Image (cartoon, helix red, strand yellow):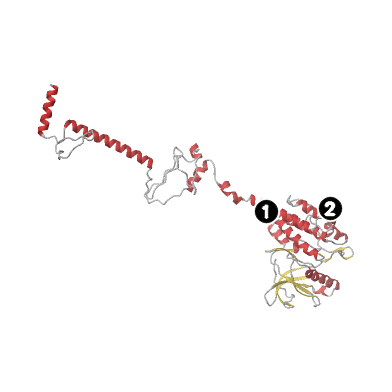
């Protein structure tokens, strides 16, 4: 609620309350922000000086105080104190922080279907308590609804009247705000709780569209539309339109009761809130934002954990695909582990190898086993060839160290080839060949 500085003509103290700011002004008087000695903040309404001498306005003010005392409910501002016999009668209610519904919509735009239904359900429940006290508000409109942190609150019972009273202050003059008055108020018929239901329907339509269901114009034009024309509900959500239209029925008997409204609006609010939760974008962020197709491989590579490299270390090589090339089937079928790391796999679609802290790629265990096996086989073949050659040609000079040598055949030992043995073998070879 907007606050203004006190003007020169404004009082500074009223009763036991010190006034701090102006909260607004209406047809009956000015509303101030005040506080008592304990620091409790109140909204204090004082009748204008030119109306304080008018007995009709004094009576009207007394009705507001009487209505506020009779209502017991969490949707209205609690009466704190009043003085109806003062030169300028006043009364103080509990201060409700928060903007009015009119200001909220004017500054931020129409409310969502779930918000409209929630506000309407709370207001309907509050009107149940008002009507049970035998009071009809008669001027329910967006500017008389405050949106506090604890929920909406109904204020300004200045023209509230007992059930069944006439709505005319003077002959041919309707009391209330054009565009939110019920047809029976315009005609001067008796008011009932259905009168507030009509005003609530017009208020919900304003909250959903930002405009009155009967448009704009002079008071006479607006009152004529209320009585003779159907409301324009373009822009009202489909979930709320049938119920709002029922509230704006010309015949009071065709309008739903405040209790029915409260139950129905609670159901709509729950359903609309659940619908918003089901389609909340953040719930499907992983499916919507994750790239697919050619960008999937780049997405996986970007999410791969990279370790810091030393200076002069070449960057890791990619999987061989050129920028902009179409991924292979193996690349498209890549699965990732938890944490975004691509799972290892063979084939052309294998992800790029990671580098170690020294800049070298880690050894492939399978390739390392293959190399060791080839190395062992080649070494054995070379050793066997050398052994076979030595067995046929004899030992090389300087190689005879007296150790036992092994031929290619296992578990067979030979004595060292001394000079006598060599001569004997030579003679045996000559006899065999010659």
Residue in view at x 10 percent, y 33 percent: 419
Instruction: Work out which residue is located at the far front of the displayed protein and give it.
Output: 411
> Residue 63's image quarter?
bottom right
- 370 vs 430, left or right, is right
- Based on the displayed image, in which of its 4 quarters is residue 127 positioned? bottom right
Which quadrant of the figure contains the N terminus? bottom right
Question: Farthest top residue?
Answer: 434
User: Which mark is on residue 229?
Assistant: 2
Where residue 60 sits: x, y (%)?
Answer: 83, 70
The image shows residue 61 at horizontal and vertical percentages of: 81, 71
Viewer-proximal residue among 428 and 362: 428
Crowding at dot 1, Cα within 10 Å, few <14 / some 14-19 / many 20+, comes out as some
Identify the residue shown where x is 14% and y is 22%.
433
Q: Is residue 139 above or below residue 243?
A: below
- Please indicate whether residue 268 sits to the left or right of residue 364 in the image: right
**Residue 412 image point, x, y percent:** 20, 34
The answer to which of marks 1 and 2 sits earlier in the sequence is: 2
Q: Is residue 301 visible?
A: yes
420 on left or right of 248: left
Q: Residue at x 77, y 51 (%)?
A: 242
Q: CA distance from mark 1 to mark 2?
A: 33 Å
Q: Nearer the viewer, residue 390 or 90?
A: 390
Q: Residue at x 79, y 64 (%)?
A: 130
> Which image quarter is the C terminus in?
top left
Q: Are marks 1 and 2 in contact (CB under 8 Å)?
A: no
Determine if residue 233 is in view.
no
Name the residue that disc number 1 marks: 273
* Rendering quarter of residue 137: bottom right
Dot 2 lies on which element?
loop
For residue 434, which numbered disc appears in the image?
Answer: none
């Amino acid at each position: 609620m907007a606050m203004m500085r006190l003007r020169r003509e404004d009082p500074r103290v009223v009763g036991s309350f010190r006034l701090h700011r102006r909260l607004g002004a209406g047809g009956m008087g000015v509303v101030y922000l005040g506080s008592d000695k304990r620091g409790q903040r109140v909204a204090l309404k004082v009748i204008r000086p030119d109306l304080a001498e008018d007995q009709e306005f004094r009576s009207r003010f007394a009705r507001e105080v009487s209505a506020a005392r009779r209502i017991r409910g969490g949707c209205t501002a609690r009466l704190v104190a009043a003085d109806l016999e003062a030169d300028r009668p006043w009364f103080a209610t509990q201060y409700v922080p928060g903007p009015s519904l009119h200001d909220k919509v004017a500054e931020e735009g129409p409310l969502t279907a779930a918000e409209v239904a929630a506000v309407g359900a709370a207001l309907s429940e509050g009107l149940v308590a008002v009507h049970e006290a035998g009071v009809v508000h008669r001027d329910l409109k967006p500017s008389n609804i405050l949106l506090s942190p604890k929920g909406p609150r109904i204020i300004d019972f200045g023209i509230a009247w007992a059930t069944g009273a006439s709505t005319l202050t003077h002959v041919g003059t309707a009391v209330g705000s054009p565009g939110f008055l019920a047809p029976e108020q315009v005609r001067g018929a008796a008011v009932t709780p259905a009168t507030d239901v009509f005003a609530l329907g017009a208020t919900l339509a304003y909250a959903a569209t930002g405009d009155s269901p009967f448009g704009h114009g002079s008071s006479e034009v607006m009152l004529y539309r209320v009585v003779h024309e159907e409301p324009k509900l373009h822009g009202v959500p489909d979930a709320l339109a049938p119920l709002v239209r029922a509230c704006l029925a010309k015949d009071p008997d065709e309008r739903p009761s405040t209790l029915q409204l409260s139950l129905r609006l609670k159901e709509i609010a729950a359903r609309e809130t659940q619908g918003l939760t089901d389609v909340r974008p953040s719930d499907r962020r992983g499916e919507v934002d994750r790239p697919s197709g050619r960008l999937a491989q780049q997405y996986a590579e970007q999410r791969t954990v990279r370790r810091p490299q030393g200076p002069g270390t070449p960057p890791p090589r990619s999987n061989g695909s050129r920028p902009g090339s179409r991924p292979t089937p193996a690349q498209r079928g890549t699965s990732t582990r938890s944490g975004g790391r691509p799972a290892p796999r063979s084939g052309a679609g294998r992800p790029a190898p990671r580098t170690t802290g020294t800049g070298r790629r880690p050894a492939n265990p399978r390739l390392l086993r293959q190399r060791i096996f080839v190395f062992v086989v080649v070494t054995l073949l070379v050793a066997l060839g050398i052994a076979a050659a030595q067995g046929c040609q004899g030992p090389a000079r300087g190689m005879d160290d007296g150790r036992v040598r092994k031929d290619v055949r296992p578990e067979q030992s030979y004595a060292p080839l001394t000079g006598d043995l060599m001569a004997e073998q030579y003679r045996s070879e000559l006899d065999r060949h010659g």
